Image: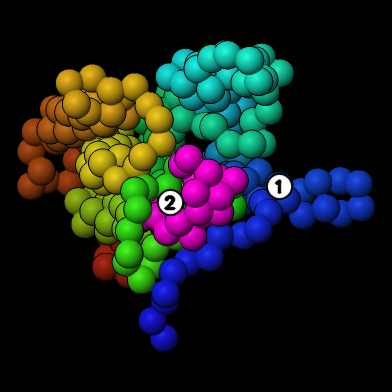
Amino acid sequence: MILASIPSPSSGVIHLGPIPIRAYALCIILGIIVAVMVADRRLVARGGRKGAVAEVATWAVPFGLVGARLYHLATDPELYWGGPGRGGTIRALEIWHGGLGIWGGVLGGALGAYIGARRHNVDFAMLADAVAPGLVLAQAIGRWGNYFNQELYGRHTSLPWGLQIDAAHAPNGVAGTFQPTFLYESLWDISVALFVIWADRQWRLRNGRVFALYVALYTFGRFWIESLRIDTTHRFLGLRLNDWTSIVVFVCAVVYFVVRRPKDPTNNVSESGQVEPEVSDSADKVRDVG
């Protein structure tokens, strides 16, 4: 079956009596659950304590949500305070309508995770490496919230997988078919998660290098996906703000990944400086379960 286009949902809200259940929020919640489950398994496989990820998440999740919203507000203030009818501060607090910046989310989440790790006696670098694949899977799930809100799509397209956007959400109030950038990023994120898990098993990455690899790969994909988007944003020297952010973060991640590599990869010393015991192939698979 060949798609003529991808239909958008008529509404992103399901009402259970008087209670509105928003698909955007459900996508975020599901992403958090997946991230915690994957990270917990990986942390235990690295020698961490079972349940520690959930404890740290009580700090990382709220910090991440606040950071993501603040980044969005800081980079697009005109959407809320740009003139009459924008909604101002009240609308700026309505997070369920969308508007979360991944860069602020990662920064705020990292700060919250660091605080949580210190309070619960968890090695932060080991935690970051354990979290990386689950975090990018959470991003893959969260992007579907943009689908339900009919937002952050790309330019017009006649491709058979183009995304239908109704007049209420389309530029200039004209319905059309647009690039489904939410789908591109979701698929890219899943690919990044699988590659990071494979690379971690293959090379036994330690000391935050798994997280650095995730960041580098994600920003590489985000750069070309940004080139398809048409939502209003600030531009510098012809590039969108998120493009510049991707470039800077990508360079920092690559530098960290290279600088923190083990000095002698031929021996069985982990990147944390501790000697790792020799293990059989079967035991190794259990230890590095993703």
**From this viewpoint, which residue is outermost toward the bottom?**
1
As rendered, which of 132 and 52 lies closer to the eye? 132
Percent x, y of residue 100:
52, 32
Q: Are marks 2 and 1 in contact (CB under 8 Å)?
A: no
Q: Residue at x 62, y 21 (%)?
A: 86
User: Disc 1 residue type?
Assistant: Arg
* Residue 67 belongs to magenta span: no
Closer to the camera, 258 or 228? 228
Q: Which residue is mark 1?
A: 22
The magenta stretch spans residue 168: yes
Q: Is residue 159 above or below residue 66?
A: below
**Callout 2: SS:** helix
Q: Residues within 10 Å of mark 1 (few under 14, many from 20)?
A: some
**x, y (%) of residue 162?**
39, 63
* Secondary element at image label 1: strand
Whether residue 9 sits left or right of residue 183 in the image: it is right
What segment is highlighted magenta in the picture?
164-186
Write down the quadrant of residue 276 in the picture: top left
Relative depth, front residue between 76 and 193:
76
240 and 127: which one is in front? Answer: 240
Badge 2 local density, few (<14 within 10 Å), some, or many (20+)? many
Q: Residue at x 50, y 16 (%)?
A: 77
Q: Which residue is mark 2?
A: 182
Answer left or right for 104 relative to 11: left
Question: Mark 2 vs mark 1: which is more N-terminal?
Answer: 1
Residue 193 point in image, percent of width and height: 35, 53
Visible in this render: residue 94? yes
Q: Amino acid at mark 2?
A: Phe
